[in-house]
Amino acid sequence: MTYAPDRIYEEVAYVAYHFHWPLNDILDLEHGQRLRYVKEIAGINTRLSQER
């Protein structure tokens, strides 16, 4: 199974923007781990926006 390059860019940009991690550290994550961080960041953002 291949993974769409555009989707990888989206995930990496999302994690990098929020956590300020270096590119290589994010790319070294397994796909499942990276998706988990994306999910957690989205949850944090949702909670923060609801508190406003």
Image (tube, helix red, strand yellow):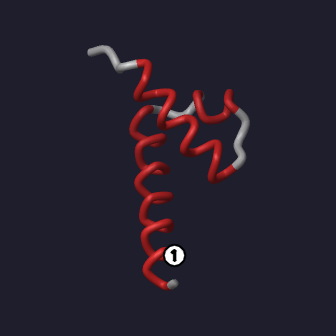
Residue 51: image location, x then y, percent = 49, 85
Residue 19: image location, x then y, percent = 66, 52
Above or below: residue 2 compared with residue 29: above
Please, which residue is most extreme toward the front here?
52
Residue 4: image location, x then y, percent = 36, 19
Position of 40 compared to 14: left or right?
Answer: left
Please, which residue is most extreme toward the left here?
1
Quadrant into which the N terminus falls: top left
Residue 25: image location, x then y, percent = 67, 34
Tally the marks. Answer: 1
Which residue occupies 57% across, 45% down?
A: 15
Number of other residues with Cα within 10 Å of mark 1, as a class: few under 14, some 14 to 19, many 20 or more: few
- Please identify the quarter of the rendering in which residue 16 is found: top right
Identity, as a three-letter code, of the amino acid under mark 1: Leu
Please, which residue is most extreme toward the bottom here?
51
Give the residue number, with chain letter if any, for mark 1: 48
Which residue occupies 48% across, 74% down?
A: 49
Which residue occupies 46% across, 49% down?
A: 38
Query: Circle 1 sits in a helix, a strand or a loop, which is it?
Result: helix
Above or below: residue 10 compared with residue 37: above
Tell which of 10 and 27 is nearer to you.
10
